[in-house]
């Protein structure tokens, strides 16, 4: 047998040790065709399909790892309860801390424990808040869970609103006071002007009476006239 023939026989039938002659078939056309089919079967199923299956397994595990990393990233940077992202929450102000928010205010397990508490508590012992929440929970309505808000955000918004309202009221009061002052000033100016006009009219009437008196007496009183014209009513006659 040639080297090729022996290699083909050993690869195809794998004869036992020291008994090659009894296992060597005649290398006819059927054996050659069978040998080719066996080799092709080994290549297709043992190599190609193995690589395909291995590739699918690796791809699936890679996809699962990516999804797991995305979930971990979401849990780290998104509030599971209200949906606030880390960046959006930090942009609310220096007093807002995202880690404190998801670790205390909106700690996920607190909501789970609260629902468990409600389901195991006698409904007759519920307070107002518990009755309200359990009614929503029983109807599978989750509007009781805060969305894009929290107690701190609502408290700060209420405080800002009260401050703005107080500032608006202050501005309104200041405006009213300014208007009242303007009205009082206008009234004072009017009264002062009327009094000055009355004084001027009385001064004119006094001068006319003095002139009439001087004419009647036939003598002039220059000192009196000069004093009155100059507006010095305290000057002696």
Image (tube, rainbow, N blue to C red):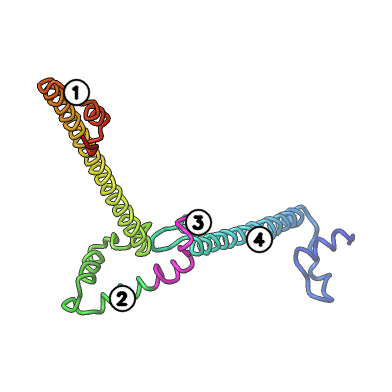
Instruction: Name the residue furthest left.
Output: 216
Q: What is the crowding at mark 2: few (fewer than 14 residues within 10 Å), some, or many (at least 20)?
A: few
Say which of 195 and 207 sits in front.
Answer: 207
Classed neighbour count for the residue bearing mark 1: other residues with Cα under 10 Å, few (<14), some (14–19), many (≥20): some
Mark 2 and mark 3: span between their CA atoms? Answer: 32 Å
Report crowding for label 4: few under 14, some 14 to 19, many 20 or more residues within 10 A (C-alpha): few
Q: Which residues are magenta?
A: 90-109
The residue tagged 1 is 220
Q: What's the distance in space between the residues labelled 1 and 4, CA to CA?
A: 144 Å
- Residue identified by numbered label 3: 87
User: Circle 2 sits on which residue?
Assistant: 116
Q: Earlier in the sequence, mark 2 or mark 1?
A: 2
Sooner in the amino-acid sequence: mark 1 or mark 3 = 3
Q: Is residue 67 above or below residue 18?
A: above
Q: Secondary structure at mark 1?
A: loop
Q: CA distance from mark 1 to mark 3?
A: 98 Å
Instruction: Give coordinates of residue 209: x percent, y percent.
Output: 12, 25
Q: Is residue 211 magenta?
A: no
**Of labels 4 and 2, the one closer to you:** 2
Residue shown at 29% from the left, 53% from the top: 165
The correct choice, above or below, for 103 with respect to 194 in the image is below
Q: What distance separates the C-alpha of mark 4 from that of mark 2? A: 49 Å
Mark 4 or mark 3, which is nearer the start of the sequence? Answer: 4
**Camera-side mark, 2 or 1:** 1
Marks 2/1: CA distance? 115 Å
């Amino acid at each position: 047998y040639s080297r090729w023939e022996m290699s083909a026989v050993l690869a195809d039938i794998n004869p036992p040790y020291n008994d090659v002659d009894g296992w060597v078939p005649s290398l006819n056309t059927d054996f050659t065709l069978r040998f080719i089919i066996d080799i092709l079967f080994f290549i297709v199923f043992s190599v190609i399909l193995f690589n395909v299956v291995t590739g699918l397994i690796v791809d699936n595990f890679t996809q699962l790892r990516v999804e797991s990393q995305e979930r971990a990233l979401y849990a780290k940077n998104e509030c599971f309860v209200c949906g606030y992202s880390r960046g959006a929450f930090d942009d609310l102000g220096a007093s807002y801390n995202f880690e404190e928010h998801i670790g205390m205010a909106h700690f996920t397990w607190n909501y789970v424990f609260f629902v468990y508490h409600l389901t195991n508590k006698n409904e007759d012992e519920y307070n107002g808040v518990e009755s309200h929440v359990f009614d929503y929970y029983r109807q599978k309505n989750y509007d009781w869970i805060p969305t894009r808000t929290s107690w701190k955000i609502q408290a700060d918004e209420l405080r800002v609103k009260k401050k703005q309202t107080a500032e608006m009221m202050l501005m309104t009061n200041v405006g009213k006071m300014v208007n009242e002052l303007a009205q009082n000033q206008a009234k004072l100016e009017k009264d002062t002007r009327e009094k000055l006009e009355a004084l001027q009219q009385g001064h004119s009437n006094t001068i006319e009476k003095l002139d009439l008196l001087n004419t009647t007496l036939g003598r002039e009183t220059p000192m009196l006239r000069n004093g009155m014209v100059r507006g010095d009513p305290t000057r002696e006659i």
